[in-house]
Amino acid sequence: MPKVKISEYSQTAANNTDINSINLAEGMLPSDVNNAIRELMKQIKDFQVGSAGDSVTVGGSLIAVGTTTLKGLTYPTSDGTNGQFLKTDGSGTLSFATGASGDVTTTGTQTLTNKTLTDPAIIGAIAEDVYTISDGAAFEIDPGNGSVQLITLGASRTPKATNFAAGESVVLMVDDGSAYTLTWTDSTFGGSGVVWKTNGGVAPTLNTSGYTVITLWKVSTQVYGARVGDA
């Protein structure tokens, strides 16, 4: 069979008796020498530009100097910095880029702000923020401060829920101070105030010692509440 491309050459020198039907035997015509060299140069060029369709097996290291383009993707000619990643311009050119602030990576500690997790699998314990509210006449219960919040009353108060969003909830632990009370009628809770789902729909009476534990959650525009336990 005529050897028309490099992949058809033999690793045994004696088996290479032609190049595209040009006789390479001992005593070949002088004209065949010229033709053989020309044919060899053509086949090497076909291999270089890829028109021969030959595969390449590299036994050692492959070191590319200059621009590298693989399957239409052009790679950078120099390394990026630690932590960078490859991105495409959509036209086949790759370059190193730095992740935007807030991007989630697969390692290390991540702070997620305004991220949506769809059906996450949580393995291990979840540590919830415990936040102590500063007492005031109309102190705010803001879920953004933590899912467990503590307040010690310095007087009877009317709390607010200005930043309470639908779907958020808070476990509130209230120390009544010196027998102070809470009024839950502020309009930021929705309608006429918190809608209570325990104690017959009435706001809980605060314990005179220790904490009273209350759960608050918001659905649509209304905050609902329930006392936790009776201790």
Image: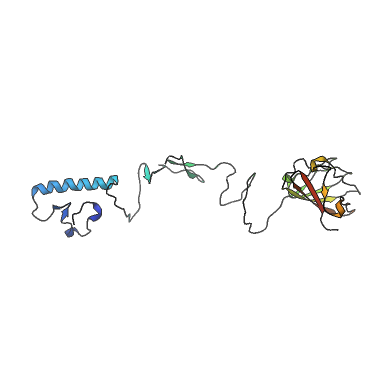
Tell me where residue 154 sits by quadrant. top right
Q: How many callouts does the rendering have?
A: 0
For the C terminus, give its image quadrant: bottom right
Q: Position of residue 132 (x, y in %)?
A: 78, 47
Q: Is residue 16 left or right of residue 200?
A: left
Measured as percent of width and height from the top left, residue 146 is found at 73, 48
Q: At 20% across and 60% down in the image, what residue appears?
A: 12
Residue 230: name its quadrant: bottom right
List x then y, in percent, for residue 167: 72, 48
Describe the colour scheme in one phrase.
Answer: rainbow
Looking at this view, is 159 or 99 the one in front?
159
Residue 29 placed where, x, y %? 8, 50
Question: In this orientation, which residue lies closer to the viewer: 100 or 55?
Answer: 55
Q: Is residue 102 left or right of residue 150?
A: left
Image quadrant holding the N terminus, namely bottom left
Answer with the quarter of the image where residue 8 lies: bottom left
Q: Residue furthest right?
A: 179
x 16%, y 47%: residue = 37
Front-most of 60 and 17? 17
